[in-house]
Structure formats: structure tokens, C-alpha cells
């Protein structure tokens, strides 16, 4: 093991270009201030990420995904992570509702892409692309690629989920460099996305854990069931 994060552990392999990601059940929110475990979260997130990464790869989005090894482990390309979290929003929710005093659920006229500096001590502050360029976190060319990839992911996942009765409210992506190429990394799952049932607007994601809404495990399993169908 060479790295342990809040939700995953990373292991090196005999190939320096490949790593194994192990998906834990540990759940944190509010930058680690709230902690617990969600039973089988690692299994659900590993499988859901596999399904989403496979869909994206099929549609021309390059990702770090190589293959799922077992219930909790995924073989991935080793990235040099760009320390910028990219958030795409289709409806107002979460920090956007709070910061701008807008009602949760308000639709946006077009998807909005935001950047956050990946820093635990600073609580991931929102930044401009200019900051990322000025401080050398990403080049202008990389940000252009990140924007295009993030919007493409939004379009593909929104359509896929809409067909399964799910609204893709917003989500967070991480990107990294791999032999001069920008690849989509991390995971795509109920920890990193807001999923709402289209008919009832019931939350089917980590907000159930963040705000003690109950039915956390059930929501993760329900989302996996829909994505697998
Ligand atoms: P918000 O800025 O509203 O808190 O989050 C926007 C979207 O990005 C949500 O879908 C949320 O799950 C995801 N997101 C933002 N920051 C993080 C983070 O540090 N970790 C995880 N897992 N998801 C995040």
C-alpha cells in the first residue's frame, strides 16, 4: 500500500504504470468531521464505477479504468493526479444552494462547471481556472480538455440515468496525467454524485448519510440495481 485516502486504499503492482484501488466501506462527510461506515459501500462503488467507466470508454472518454478484479478491487492506470476537483451541476443543490441562496432543485439553463482546489487543510476551496494555471496545478490546455471531458461525461451519464428514472443533479470528477495524456480518474458513484429519483425526487446518494436521512445502504443498492439494468 502506498496511499490511503478517505474511501480507498491504493496498492502498487509489479507494473509501475498500474495500481490496485481497494474500495473501503468508510464514509466521511464535511471534510472528515463526520465519520461512519456504510455496509457494502465499497462493493457498490467499485461495481458502479466499473459500469460508468466502461460506458464512458465506449463513448470515447479516456479513463484510468483497466478492469475490476473482485468485489472491492479495481485495476487502474497510475495517474499523476491534478489537484483540482471538477464539479458539474445540472440542478442547484448542496454548496451552490447554500452559497448563492438558491432553492435546491432549481434547474440550471445549462450545465455549470466549477473547480475546487483539492486541499484538506483548506476544505477544498472553490477556485477559478486562472488560479489553477497561476499556481501550476494545471495548464490552460489541460483545463480546456478537462472542461470538454467533464461536459461529455455529464451528457452521457445524464442520458443513461434518465433512461433509468434518475436525475443526475451534480457530480465531482478528478483527472490525472498518464504519459502526457489527461485521463479521468477516481470513482463515479453515490459518494461523488447527487442522484435523485426522477418521479419522487428522493435522494439516492451520499446526502442520505451527510444529512442523517436514513436508508443509506438501501439507496446505494437501489442505485446499483438501476445502473445494472
Ligand atoms: P457540493 O459542492 O454541492 O458539496 O458538491 C457538488 C457535487 O460534488 C456533489 O455531487 C458531491 O457529492 C461532489 N463532491 C464535491 N466535493 C466532494 C468531495 O470532496 N468528495 C466527494 N466524494 N464528493 C464531492
Image (cartoon, rainbow, N blue to C red):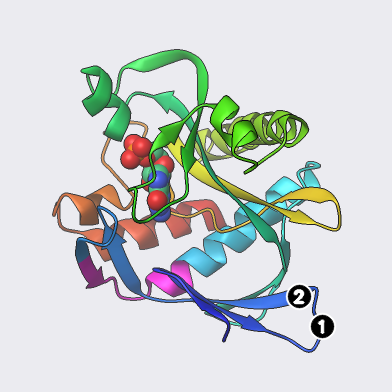
Q: Which of 183 and 117 is in front in this view?
A: 117
Question: Dot 2: within a 10 Å radius of its alpha carbon, few (fewer than 14), some, or many (20 or more) residues?
Answer: some
Residue bounds of the magenta highlight: 35-44
Q: Which residue is drawn at 65% across and 30% down?
A: 147
The percent position of residue 112, horizontal first and vertical second, equals: 50, 22
Reply yes or no: does residue 42 show up in magenta. Answer: yes
Reply yes or no: does residue 22 show up in magenta. Answer: no
Tag shown at residue 15: 1
The percent position of residue 108, horizontal first and vertical second, equals: 42, 15
Above or below, 11 against 53 in this view is below
CB of mark 2 within 8 Å of CB of mark 1? yes
Q: Which residue is drawn at 48% across and 64% down?
A: 45
The percent position of residue 65, horizontal first and vertical second, equals: 71, 63
Q: Residue at x 44, y 73 (%)?
A: 42
Tag shown at residue 128: none
- Cα distance in 3D space between marks 2 and 1: 6 Å
**Horizontally, is 39 left or right of 165 in the view?**
left
Q: Can residue 168 be seen in this view?
A: no
Ligand 1's quadrant: top left
Farthest right residue in view: 179
Above or below, 35 against 88 in this view is below
Q: Quadrant of residue 219?
A: bottom left
Above or below, 164 against 92 in this view is below
**Which image quarter is the N terminus in?**
bottom right
Above or below, 117 against 24 in this view is above
Residue occupied by mark 2: 18
Q: Which of 62 and 10 is in front in this view?
A: 10
Label 2 secondary element: strand
Label 1 secondary element: loop
- Ligand 1 contact, mark 2 (Cβ < 8 Å): no
Q: Nearer the viewer, residue 152 or 166?
A: 152
Amino acid at each position: 500500500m502506498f496511499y490511503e485516502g478517505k474511501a480507498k486504499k491504493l496498492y502498487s503492482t509489479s507494473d509501475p504504470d498500474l495500481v490496485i484501488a481497494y474500495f473501503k466501506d468508510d464514509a466521511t462527510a464535511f471534510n472528515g468531521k463526520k465519520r461512519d461506515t456504510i455496509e457494502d459501500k465499497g462493493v457498490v462503488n467499485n461495481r458502479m464505477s466499473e459500469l460508468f467507466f466502461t460506458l464512458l470508454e465506449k463513448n470515447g472518454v479516456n479513463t484510468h479504468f483497466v478492469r475490476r478484479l473482485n468485489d472491492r478491487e479495481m485495476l487502474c492506470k497510475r495517474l499523476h493526479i491534478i489537484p483540482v476537483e471538477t464539479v458539474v451541476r445540472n440542478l442547484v443543490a448542496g454548496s451552490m444552494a447554500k452559497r448563492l441562496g438558491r432553492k435546491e432543485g432549481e434547474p440550471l439553463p445549462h450545465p455549470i462547471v466549477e473547480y475546487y482546489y483539492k486541499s484538506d487543510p483548506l476544505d477544498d476551496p472553490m477556485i477559478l481556472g486562472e488560479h489553477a494555471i497561476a499556481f501550476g496545478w494545471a495548464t490552460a490546455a489541460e483545463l480546456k480538455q478537462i472542461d470538454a471531458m467533464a461536459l461529455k461525461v455529464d451528457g452521457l451519464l445524464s442520458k443513461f440515468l434518465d433512461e433509468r428514472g434518475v436525475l443526475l443533479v451534480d457530480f465531482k470528477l478528478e483527472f490525472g496525467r498518464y504519459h502526457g495524456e489527461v485521463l479521468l480518474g477516481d470513482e463515479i458513484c453515490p459518494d461523488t454524485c447527487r442522484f435523485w429519483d426522477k418521479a419522487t425526487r428522493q435522494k439516492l446518494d451520499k446526502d442520505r448519510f451527510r444529512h442523517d436521512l436514513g436508508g443509506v445502504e438501501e439507496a446505494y443498492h437501489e442505485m446499483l440495481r438501476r445502473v445494472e439494468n
